[in-house]
Each structure stands twice: as C-alpha cells, then as structure tokens.
Amino acid sequence: METTGDLAASVRSILESAGERGGADAVLDVDPRSVERALERAEADGRVPIIAEVKPTSPTSDGVRNDDPATLAQEMVAGGATAISVLTEPTHFGGSADALRDVRAAVDVPVLRKDFVLEEAHLDLVEADLVLLIARFVDDLAGLLAAARDRGFQVLVEVHDRAELETALEAGAEVIGVNNRDLARLEVDLETFESVAPHVPDDVTLIAESGISTPADVRRMREAGADALLVGSAIMDHAGETDGDVRANTRRLTTAETDTT
Ligand SMILES: O=P(O)(O)OC[C@@H](O)[C@@H](O)c1c[nH]c2ccccc12
C-alpha cells in the first residue's frame, strides 16, 4: 500500500478505522445478479446506465440523510437506476451492512458494496453482487480480486490515474471505475475520467465515478466512453436543494441522452 502521507486527513482516518474493522466468521458464497445483463437491459430501454448510490453522508457532503435505505433504493430504481451502490463504511459515510442487506432484499437490480476493503476477511461482512476494491489502497490487488471472485462477487476496481489503471489491468480487472475525486485533496475534476478512459481496453466495462451532477455531465462522461456512471451526491441531495426527491433526481440523469432540454 502507498504511504498515506499525501492523503486528505479524513481519508487517512477512514483507512485507519477500516484497518481495525474485523472480518466475519464464515467465508461467503454469493450468487450474484449480473451487472453485464443489467447494463444491457438499460441500453435496450434507452436509459443511461446509472449506478445510484445510497450514501447517508460523506466527508465532502453538506448534511446527512437518514431516510430508510431500502425506500431510497426503490425510488432510485423507479427513476431508472441500473444498479444501486450502498455505502457500508460506518464511521465517515453513515453506512452499514444492514443497510446493504435491506436494499438487496428490496430491489432486484445488482447491488454494489461501497467500502474500504483492505484484506480478504473484510470481504465476508455482507453479500453483494459487486464489491469495490480501490487500487490505491490494496496491497495485493490480484490476490484480493481472486479472493472476491472465489466468493462469487463481481468486482469493481477503482483507479484515479494511468498508473493505477495499469495495476488494475495487470491484476485482471474486468470492471474498472475511474474516480474523478482526488483522494489527496478531495476535489472533483471530470477531466480525470477523460484523461484515463482512452487507455482502457474495449472489453473492460468502464464506469465514471463521482462529481456527476447534471445531464450535461452525464453526456460528457458518456462521450468520453463511460459504459455506466456512479452517482451519489446529486441524487441523495444532502443539502436538500431539490426537495430530496431521489426518484426525480435519478430520472433526470437516466434520461439525459433522450431528454436534451
Ligand atoms: O457523490 P458523488 O460525487 O456522486 O460520488 C459517488 C461515488 O463515486 C463516491 O461516493 C465514491 C467513489 N469512490 C468511493 C470510494 C469510497 C467511498 C465513496 C466513493
């Protein structure tokens, strides 16, 4: 793992608490809902493939939403979401394994577990269809990827630059997310995706992550090659700028390529 000296203080503290969280008693055996199939269904219906994120709060959000995660997820699916991402990180994002379990029981789309998984035992906290591994924070990416696949998980490997992309490809990642947020400064720049995307092989499923808030942002990321987009804050609307209507917020983005008004 890289030294944590160049990371934002909140990210250092997230990693410290992640390292202290234990695993689980049993090794999971997951029967996953196919992400590939879900993406094909969205494209066939003319919906932009959006992975909508249930994120009660975050170090960069203005506020907290304590709505029932399962209800939020159902509203997101009603707004056309292709998959749901659920934070399970408890100390900085207000997430939990129970929230993910409730969401997965309430919807029939694939569910991504969003957390700071650093070692094999962390994989066994809760079943999900897709699990996130962050290239920058994982020592043995190929090993953890294999351990996740052995359990049946599909795996989203997150990168932020070309060097991390190479690491992800060498490790055999098939689904790669480019995070527009820089974890050293916590700032978002959509150019990050645009600069990394051209170097991603066509057979990789490519996801643009973070900082996507408007239909124009959606179109920009799609033009740069995104197969899907991961959106949290603009849908959760922690500050309450859109009456917190998660269904409408999701629909505005899933229809961005058909409704260009
Ligand atoms: O809220 P945003 O800017 O739409 O971002 C969503 C998602 O990309 C972000 O929550 C995220 C991306 N990678 C992460 C890793 C851990 C925790 C959270 C994240």
Image (cartoon, rainbow, N blue to C red):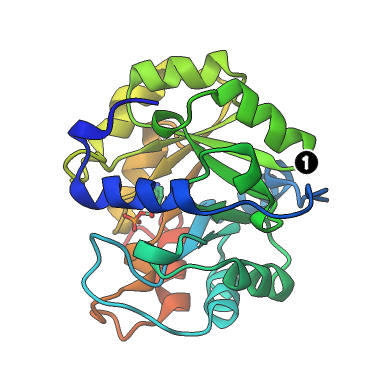
- Quadrant in which residue 94 is drawn: bottom left
Quarter of the picture containing the N terminus is top left
Q: Is residue 167 left or right of residue 61?
A: right
In the image: residue 110, left or right of residue 197: right
Q: In this figure, which residue is indicated by the disc labeled 1?
A: 151
Which residue is drawn at the image coordinates 34% and 31% (left, top)?
160
Residue 231 vertical placement versus 75 (above, below): above
Give the quarter of the figure containing the C terminus.
bottom left
Q: Is residue 258 above or below residue 196?
A: below
Q: Nearer the viewer, residue 12 or 107?
A: 12
Instruction: Examine the image and state in which quarter residue 36 appears.
Output: top right
Name the residue located 43 percent from the left edge and 21 percent from the top edge: 165
Q: Which residue is at 39% across, 45% downward? A: 209
Instruction: Respond yes or no on whether mark 1 lies under 8 Å from ligand 1.
Output: no
Q: Residue at x 73, y 72 (%)?
A: 105
Q: Amino acid at mark 1?
A: Arg
Q: Position of residue 34 (x, y in %)?
A: 75, 46
Q: How many marks?
A: 1
Query: Which image quarter: residue 248?
Result: bottom left
- Pinpoint residue 111: horizontal percent, then vertical percent: 63, 58
Task: Identify the secondary structure beneath mark 1.
Answer: loop
Q: Nearer the viewer, residue 193 or 66?
A: 66
Asked if 67 appears above or below 96 in the picture, the reply is: below
Q: Nearer the viewer, residue 137 or 257?
A: 137
Q: Position of residue 168 (x, y in %)?
A: 51, 22
**Residue 211 seen in the current view:** no
Q: Dot 1, how many residues are within 10 Å of its Cα: few (below 14), some (14-19), or many (20+)?
A: some
From the top left corner, tell me how far across and down residue 205 is, in percent: 57, 32
Q: Is residue 114 visible?
A: yes
